[in-house]
């Protein structure tokens, strides 16, 4: 049992993964979360309509089979993957204004990676032979080069340089980019996108599967990890905003919560980068870190929930769209028993930000009706807007590391995991990395 006592500031995925990893190894851990709930952006919210309460996720999330650290951690915490997620082999099914798909790509489940995608591209619908050949050629080149490029650049420019035409970009690469990076393809980092492709299309063919939550996110992530941490001896303090952090002459850290001053040997700051300025004022050596994080841009994610009559279903659990504001629609009735509820995701910045929530919900409902004419007018709607959902994953973005120049002070969060975009997996890997740094001394 280590004598170290670690303070973790922030109870999102990064803070929870750090706490779980450290408590598993016998460290004393106290996690402070400013809000009444754990999970950060991966949480549930209660919505009232006509005196009835509805449990909705703060945004519709999709995980990938390649998210090995997330899946391993949830497994340790006792989460049964089959109960928590619907695992679907890679399938991109895009519609515009009719019930007939404009583009349909399915990976070949009988083949190993990356042949499952290559053969899927060969047989996909909605592309000409030359377009399919161009996509297959690019994937083969990427595989040969280990998905590495010498110089980072905007993804759209990279794809154009590789003879990917406008149709290919619109129906294949842009949906994948928005889903993976939540950054417009014109400004998204090609290098980071290729890192996600590498993890998805090498190794086990299940790495490219979509994992869609069947339970609300609090039941999948926050609650089981909280129980795991506390069962291992960790302490979790909710409604505990850290007002001040300083280092004493003896090398210990003092964390101030209200009128309380608590001592710790190590500190992991696992808050959003926008909160760093309040926590690092006492550390002049870390001002360069603040300069880096204050230069970040951010991207929104809007989730539009539309409640239809209970007997309404969509043809597929997950449907994509092109030439619309709507990007992906999820039938929550088929997915998790919330009958008649459809969740529509709109990622990254765009014209939808100029609309009011009611205007956006009406626009999205009209788009769905064009594709699926059997849909009636929704009974009610709810728009959940995360205006700073992720950092903008642009080329050559400077990102701080987990280890700082301040002894025993670490940073966790998806923005610190340089190989990945802003994802649950990046956040969890960053928390585990901080725990490993503490354990290694």
Image (tube, rainbow, N blue to C red):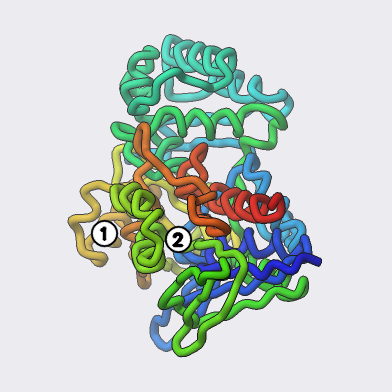
Q: Which mark is residue 436?
A: none
Cα separation between marks 2 and 1: 16 Å
Secondary structure of residue under mark 2: loop
Relative to 352, 260 lies left or right: right
Residue positioned 49% across, 31% down in the render? 104
Q: Toward the viewer: 124 or 194?
A: 194
Task: Report x, y in % for residue 297.
Answer: 29, 48
- Name which of mark 2 and mark 1 comes first in the sequence: 2
Q: Which residue is drawn at 34% across and 14% down?
A: 161
- Where residue 431 sits, quadrant-wise, is bottom right
- Depicted 3 relative to depicted 134: above or below: below
The answer to whether residue 370 is above or below residue 269 is above
**Residue at the front extreme?**
249
Name the quarter where the N terminus is drawn.
bottom right
Disc 1 is placed on an element classified as helix
Q: Which of 16 and 333 is in front in this view?
A: 16
Identify residue for label 2.
Answer: 59
- Of badges 2 and 1, the one in the foreground is 2
Dot 1 corresponds to which residue? 360
For the residues bearing labels 2 and 1, Cβ distance under 8 angstroms: no
């Amino acid at each position: 049992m280590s004598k170290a006592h670690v303070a973790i500031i922030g109870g999102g995925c990064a803070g929870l993964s750090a706490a779980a990893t450290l408590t598993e190894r016998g460290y004393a851990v106290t996690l402070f979360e400013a809000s009444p709930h754990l999970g950060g952006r991966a949480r549930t919210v209660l919505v009232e309509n006509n005196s009835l309460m509805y449990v909705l996720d703060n945004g519709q999330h999709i995980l990938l089979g390649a998210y090995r650290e997330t899946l391993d951690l949830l497994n340790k915490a006792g989460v049964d993957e089959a109960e928590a997620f619907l695992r679907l082999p890679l399938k991109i099914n895009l519609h515009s204004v009719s019930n007939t798909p404009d583009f349909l790509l399915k990976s070949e489940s009988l083949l190993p990676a990356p042949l499952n995608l290559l053969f899927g591209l060969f047989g996909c619908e909605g592309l000409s032979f030359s377009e399919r050949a161009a996509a297959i050629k690019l994937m083969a080149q990427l595989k040969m080069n280990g998905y590495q490029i010498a110089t980072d650049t905007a993804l759209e420019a990279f794809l154009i340089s590789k003879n990917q035409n406008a149709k290919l970009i619109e129906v294949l690469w842009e949906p994948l980019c928005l889903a993976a990076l939540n950054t417009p393809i014109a400004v998204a980092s090609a290098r980071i996108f290729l890192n996600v492709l590498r993890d998805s299309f090498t190794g086990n063919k299940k790495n490219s599967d979509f994992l869609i939550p069947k339970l609300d996110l609090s039941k999948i992530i926050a609650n089981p990890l909280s129980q795991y941490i506390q069962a291992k001896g960790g302490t979790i303090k909710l409604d505990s905003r850290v007002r001040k952090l300083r280092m004493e002459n003896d090398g210990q850290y003092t964390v101030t919560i209200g009128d309380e001053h608590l001592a710790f040997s190590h500190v992991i700051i696992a808050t959003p980068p926008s909160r760093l300025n309040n926590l690092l004022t006492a550390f002049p050596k870390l001002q360069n870190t603040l300069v880096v994080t204050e230069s970040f841009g951010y991207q929104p994610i809007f989730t539009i929930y539309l409640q239809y009559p209970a007997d309404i279903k969509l043809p597929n659990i997950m449907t994509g769209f092109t030439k619309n504001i709507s990007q992906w629609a999820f039938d929550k009735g088929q997915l998790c028993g919330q009958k008649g509820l459809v969740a529509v995701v709109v990622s990254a910045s765009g014209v939808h930000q100029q609309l009011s929530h009611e205007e956006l919900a009406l626009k999205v409902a009209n788009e769905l009706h064009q594709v699926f004419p059997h849909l009636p007018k929704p009974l009610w709607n709810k728009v959940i807007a995360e205006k700073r959902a992720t950092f903008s994953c642009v080329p050559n973005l400077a990102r701080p590391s987990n280890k700082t120049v301040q002894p025993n002070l670490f940073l966790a969060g998806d923005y610190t995991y340089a190989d990945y975009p802003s994802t649950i997996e990046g956040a969890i890997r960053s928390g585990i990395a901080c725990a490993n740094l503490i354990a290694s001394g």
